Amino acid sequence: MRSRLIATFVVLVLALAGCGQTATSAGPAKSDDHNDADVQFSLNMIPHHRQTIQIADLATRLGGTEQVKVVAAEILSPEEQDVQTMNGWLRSWNVAPPADMSGMDMDMPGMLSAKDIKSLQTTTGADFDKKFLTMVAKHLQNGVDMAKQVLNTGKHAGTKTLANKIVKEQGEQIQKVQALKV
């Protein structure tokens, strides 16, 4: 009876060990498919995108002209999907995604201060449009700069694809924002 119990235990341990190997091969990304630059890009770009979403959402509600509201709405859609994608990468790399720190001052180039956000929240009409367009152009340019940097230093194919998309789309958004005359 004891030998049968030991045999059952050994079979169970081997079965569980096999399950672990299968789960690992289908689970997190291999450590050699990305590098620190890819991780840092996602860790920085997520709060950057979240702030873009925050200020673009304000513009869709507080903008003084329909042009500003339309440009803001166009900015919103790709940013939300990008955040989800980068959160997924970070989790697959066993890195905790950054917490949502909306409204807090971030010590990162291109991020608006809490004072800047408050200024947007308390402004309307043409004054809002001028502030928003100036702030969002600078903010988006920082995103382009971050994306260009990871194109030179990153390794992860998905990160590079996203970075190319950011350079293209945010570059076009900057041109639209700068072309608006309010």
Image: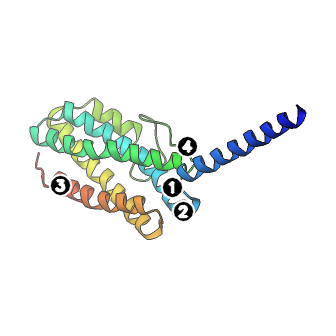
Query: Marks 1 and 3: in contact by CB < 8 Å?
Result: no
Q: Nearer the viewer, mark 3 or mark 1?
A: 1
Furthest-bottom residue in view? Answer: 152
Q: Which mark is residue 40?
A: 1
Q: Earlier in the sequence, mark 2 or mark 4?
A: 2
- Residue 102 in view: yes
Element at badge 4?
loop
Report if the CB atoms under discs 2 and 4 are less than 8 Å apart. no
Colour scheme of the rendered structure: rainbow
Q: How many numbered marks, from 0 up?
A: 4
Observer-nearest residue: 128 or 7? 7
- The numbered disc on residue 96 is 4
Q: Is residue 22 above or below residue 36?
A: above
Of labels 3 and 4, earlier in sequence is 4
Residue at 20% in and 35% down:
60
Please give the label number shown on residue 35. Answer: 2
The residue positioned 33% from the left and 51% from the top of the image is 139
In the picture of the structure, the residue carrying the numbered disc 3 is: 178
- Amino acid type at circle 1 is Gln
Label 3 – label 2 distance at C-alpha:
35 Å
Residue type beneath disc 2: Asn
Q: Of discs 3 and 4, which sits in the foreground?
A: 4
Foreground of the two, 155 or 92: 92
Of mark 4 and mark 1, the one earlier in the sequence is 1
Inspect the image, locate mark 4, and give the three-letter code of the amino acid beneath it. Answer: Ala
